[in-house]
Amino acid sequence: MRRWAILCATCVALVWTAAAVDPPKREVRAVWLTTVYGLDWPQRPARDERSRQAQQEALREILDSLAAAHFNTVFLQARLRGDVIYRSAIEPASRVFSGKTGELPGYDPLAFAIEECHRRGMECHAWFVTYPLGTERSVRQQGRLSVVRRRPELCKRHKGEWYLDPGAPGTTDYLLSLARELVENYDIDGIHFDYLRYPEEANRFPDKSLHRRHGRSMSLADWRRQNITNLVTRAYDLVKSLKPWVQVSCAPLGKYSRIEAVPNAGWTAYESVYQDPQRWMKAGKLDMVVPMMYYLHRNFFPFVDNWVANAAGRLVVPGLGAYRLDAADADWALNDVTDQMDYSRYFGGVGNAFFRCGSLLSDTKGLYRELRDRYYRYPAQLPPLTWLNDSVPAAPEAPLATRQGDTLRLSWQKPAGETRELTYTVYYAQADTLDPSLARSILATNLRETELYLPVGDGERGLLFRVTASTRYHVESPLSRETYYYWSAYEK
């Protein structure tokens, strides 16, 4: 019996005891929040102040629901199909927010989303759709602002849609200019490349003349893979030169290659669309890979093993298909997804990402409630990025606990002499000691402020608190000294 089958059987057995076991203290809990066509947000364009406020409130409600289930990462679609959701000097603002191409809705959606994510202790990664430029209709809607009109030498039409050609001289420089603009101008926590590949039916993609001109020393397949690898390498180096803490990740196809366990894997990243993310990780040019693993059973488990075995110490976060639960799609059972979560957790993954946000929050077959009440019932810190920076910050001083009516205010100071931007984790216990290795000891994490308000409620209890600081590389300090507070119905 192959290794993945043995591990899968073990994983199923673990499900029975999962309710008695804490979730991991550190893991990525991510969701893809789609803006193209307004699928997740916004539901309708904003044309006046009232609709702008409604648009913003809709995002707050989405993020509140994610925060209630202790999600810690949002991949927000910031570049769609040659248009963007932020202030750009290069590409037009998407019409999905304002109803008109090239116009923002009276505010900057990306800047707003970053602030709201950070307010809730979540990271915001700019999801960047790389090569697709949309249909003929969308190109016409963008008019003279479309890159197809402005830079026709970079673009190809394939199967009725437009794409930036990865092999065209100038394409990589153009995409790097967009990446530079994003990283320099916005406080994003990561840039997340999607569709970092050749399109479907790539054998018919019209780039043979470019290959003859620029890549004759390589086969067409190797030349195509090298074109994408060049972009990844240069993008990673660019981002790290600007803001080294900004994570670089990508969402490749879920099946890397036709591995021994599944020789007839069908559509794969390496063979079918010329992605080579395992090479990128081994070269140190990715911080995290989030493969789109929207398959079942033998098309899922052995490929998780393959990603983990070839990660070269970088983060593997399998992407799960929440939309596959829908009866109109694949009609999966809830345990199809939770079994995949268990496998990812116990056999080398460091979390999961869910596609897409609307499918998750619609709670199809109870998935959202299962995450909120069981799998994600405690907050989780993000895994440390020690290959980028392993410097440990100093511990904060012991927090100060102050009663304000029915609320307890915890406050602390940034560690003395620390100049870096920090976030904070508050640990607590209703006992004389706490165990910081357990997820259940985390009250809140990834806090950017140095205070926290707790509605404690009725009754009498003793509360023990300690605080740590973390860098933007998620490297955590030692614990502060403890603070003990006895809560009573009457102030004493």
Image (cartoon, rainbow, N blue to C red):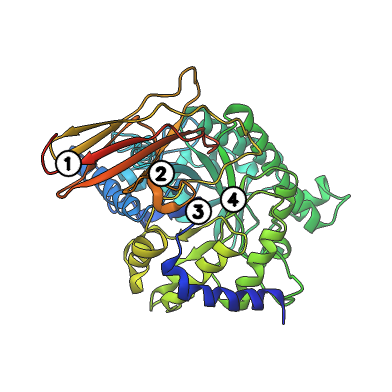
Distance, label 2 to label 4, CA atoms, is 19 Å
User: Residue 288 vs residue 220: left or right?
Assistant: left
Instruction: Please provide percent x and percent y for residue 179.
Output: 56, 36
Label 3, on which residue?
134
Q: Secondary structure at mark 1?
A: helix
Secondary structure beneath dot 2 equals loop
Given contact means CB atoms under 8 Å apart, are the residues at marks 1 and 3 in contact? Answer: no
Q: Nearer the viewer, residue 97 or 401?
A: 401
What is the quadrant of residue 37 in the picture?
bottom left
N-terminal-most mark, 1 or 2: 1
Q: CA distance from mark 4 to mark 1?
A: 36 Å
Quarter the N terminus occupies: bottom right
Nearer the observer: mark 2 or 3; the answer is 2
- Determine the CA span between mark 1 and mark 3: 30 Å
Q: Nearer the viewer, residue 462 or 160?
A: 462
- The residue most toward the right is 217
Give the residue pinned by disc 2: 122
Q: Who's the residue at 72% across and 47% down the image?
A: 229
- At a point 72% along the width and 50% down the height, the residue shown is 312
Query: What residue type is disc 1 on?
Result: Arg
Q: Which residue is mark 4?
A: 250
Q: Earlier in the sequence, mark 2 or mark 4?
A: 2
Residue 50 numbered mark, or none: 1
Q: Which structural element holds mark 3?
A: strand
Q: Pointer 1: residues within 10 angstroms few (<14), some, or many (20+)?
A: few
